[in-house]
Amino acid sequence: MNIHEYQAKEILKAYGAPVAAGVPLTDAADAEAAAKSLPGPLYVVKSQIHAGGRGKGKFKELGPDAKGGVRLAKSVDEVKANVEEMLGRTLVTKQTGEAGKVVNRLYIEDGADIARELYLSLLVDRSVGRVAFVASTEGGMDIETVAHDTPEKIVTVAIDPDTGVTEADAGQLCEALELQGEARADGMKLFPILYKAFCEKDMSLLEINPLIVLKDGHLRVLDAKVSFDGNSLFRHEDMVALRDLTEEDEKEIEASKHGLAYVALEGNIGCMVNGAGLAMATMDIIKLYGAEPANFLDVGGGASKEKVTAAFKIITADPNVKGILINIFGGIMRCDVIAEGVIAAVKEVGLQVPLVVRLEGTRVAEGKKLISESGLNVIAADDLDDAAQKIVKAVKG
């Protein structure tokens, strides 16, 4: 689960991280009061969407020469003008795709005198099985670009969970970020704070880009991106309350209500599969035969008839879907349960596109019999390769 920048900063501020004063707003009428509550005289007006590249993004409704989704303002009147122009507009960044995202929230933040911009993040490093810091002096840039062009400027420091961030760990990060004087003293305090927040809140990513050195020598968290491990949210009702459903795909929201792992994609072949690995393989083979998957959908190893029915409804609700491939390998999952769910869903919502079903595993004979005797217009497949070829051919006519 992702949250907005201002929400991430509120969490970090509660742990003691240095964060500027700021005010979120959803109504342009509140812009003047928000700006006047801040020290000024420099303000930053920031679009709050779940996507990176906001500063370099462009608003669909404005011309190509218009400012992006993060703007400096030198007066309260300039704050108001920017808020009125940005709020409710569609911001397109490299991460949103051409559709962009509507800016429903803005964050008015006190400005900063920046001396240096740095990059810092925490994530789970699967290669060592520990939470690790990733640090670079190249702040304000895409870390992927830095990794490609100048990998030597990225330093990774894995943290021993038994000790937490030691003085040696913090010192290594200070060296990597070339921190001196007051900035180094701030860093020695900040790194353990960030690690504690990451672990206690079950984050999967905490990215600060940039972490800045102010002209007075101190550190400040200028931007913050936080993602939470969805499997841990039952422990954090306060974090769940931060979820912004307007930033999520409606189909993904519906899928989460049924415990389905669903991600909307841009293709036209809907997929229903059990198991993440098999789902990835199914999408790969669809692409191999010249088509594109419309979604990733894993119904899980022990899905019920009701869960399968819900999954089918979600797939058919996507207007881009021109064909459906159901690929089930029954281990824990029984093929006859899948068949019952498919039959129930088709009878309820109808079937307007080609449907290819490949079943294998537990109670496969019973599952195939249910489908064959259902009267549904279903194309049977013997294996995954056969299924992929058949659905691609059916969709392409």
Image: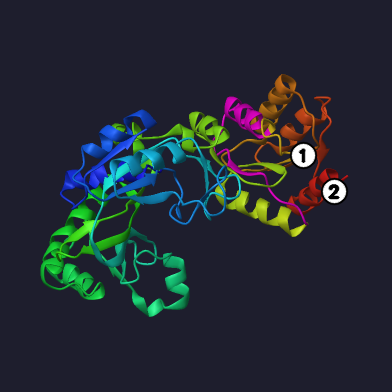
Residue 203 visible at all: yes
Q: Position of residue 326 (x, y in %)?
A: 70, 40
Q: Amino acid at mark 2?
A: Lys
In the current view of this chain or complex, which residue is farthest to the top? 348
Q: Amino acid at mark 1?
A: Lys
Frontmost residue, 110 versus 134 = 110
Expressed as whole percent of the image width and height from the top left, the position of residue 166 reads 15, 65
Residue 338 falls in image quadrant: top right
Please provide percent x and percent y for residue 199.
26, 50
Label 2, on which residue?
A: 393
> Foreground mark, 2 or 1?
1
Magenta-drawn stretch contains 391: no
Relative depth, front residue between 64 and 282: 64
86 on left or right of 360: left
Q: Which secondary structure lies at badge 2?
A: helix
- Any part of residue 162 in sight: no
**Left or right of 139, for residue 316:** right
Residue at 66% from the left image edge and 47% from the top image edge: 266
**Residue 302 drawn in magenta:** yes
User: CA gap, disc 2 to disc 1?
Assistant: 11 Å
Residue at 39% from the left image edge and 40% from the top image edge: 81
Query: Which residues lie in the magenta part?
Result: 290-315
Q: How is the image coloured?
A: rainbow
| Image quadrant where one finds the N terminus | top left
Q: Quadrant of the C terminus?
A: top right
Q: Nearer the viewer, residue 340 or 201?
A: 201
Residue drawn at 14 percent across, 62 percent down: 186
Is 91 left, or right, of 334 in this rendering? left
Is the residue 133 above or below the residue 111 in the image? Answer: below
Which residue corresponds to mark 1? Answer: 322
